[in-house]
Each structure stands twice: as structure tokens, then as C-alpha cells.
Amino acid sequence: MKQLAARVDAGDFPGAHRLQFTLLDLFYAVYGQQVSWWVAGQKYALKHMGILGSAAARVAAQQELPESQRAAIRAAIDANRDLLF
């Protein structure tokens, strides 16, 4: 988000536009298609990034994150490591 704001402040609107769509794709990959995946997806992403030691959530429904969604999260994070770290 800081990079997005910096591009806007610098007048780099095409760069800001590209970055905005990259962020939207990343958010969609992490948060998934179902509201119940929101916390689980975020925690799984933070675990994959090495920020959290566990992806466990307190709400059981949020722990039901399919492997296909976990794979999408890993791929999105790995493809955007330069942006996230």
C-alpha cells in the first residue's frame, strides 16, 4: 500500500494502476471466494510468509481451507515476494 501511495504521489498513474491490480489479485488469492475463508486464508498466508508459527483459527469453519485454496495462496505469495518483503 505504501508503494501504491508513493506511485500516486509521484504521478506514476500507470504504475499505480498496475500495482493496484497486482494487489487485488493477491488479495483475491489470499482471501478466497468464501467469506468463511477470510481469517483462515490470511493466517495461512502469514504462516507461509514465516510471520506466524501456526495457521490455526479459533472458529472451526475458518479452518476448513481446501488444499486448492492453500496452493493458490502459496503461489500468490511466492509470485509477489519482492512486493511483500
Image (cartoon, rainbow, N blue to C red):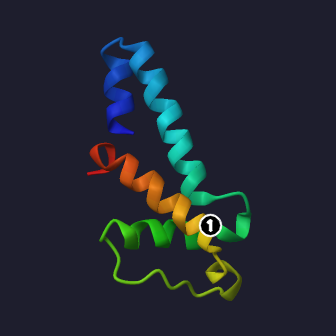
**x 55%, y 42%: residue:** 25
Quarter of the image with the N terminus in it? top left
**x 57%, y 53%: residue:** 29
Quick check: 70 above or below 10? Answer: below
From the top left corner, tell me how far across and down residue 6 is, in percent: 31, 26
Quick check: 77 above or below 5? Answer: below
Quick check: 42 above or below 78? Answer: below
User: How many callouts does the rendering have?
Assistant: 1
Residue 39 is left or right of residue 61, and the answer is left
From the top left corner, tell me how far across and down residue 4 is, in percent: 39, 30
Work out which residue is located at the far top of the displayed protein and give it.
11
**x 46%, y 55%: residue:** 75
Quick check: 85 above or below 22? Answer: below
> Label 1, on which residue?
68
Q: Quadrant of residue 15?
A: top left
Which amino acid lies under the numbered mark 1 shown in the image of this protein? Ser
Instruction: Specify few, some or many for label 1: CA neighbours under 10 Å numbering under 14, 14-19, or 20 or more.
Output: few
Q: Quadrant of residue 12?
A: top left
Q: Secondary structure at mark 1?
A: helix
Residue closer to the observer: 64 or 2: 64
**x 33%, y 19%: residue:** 9
Residue 12 is left or right of residue 65, and the answer is left
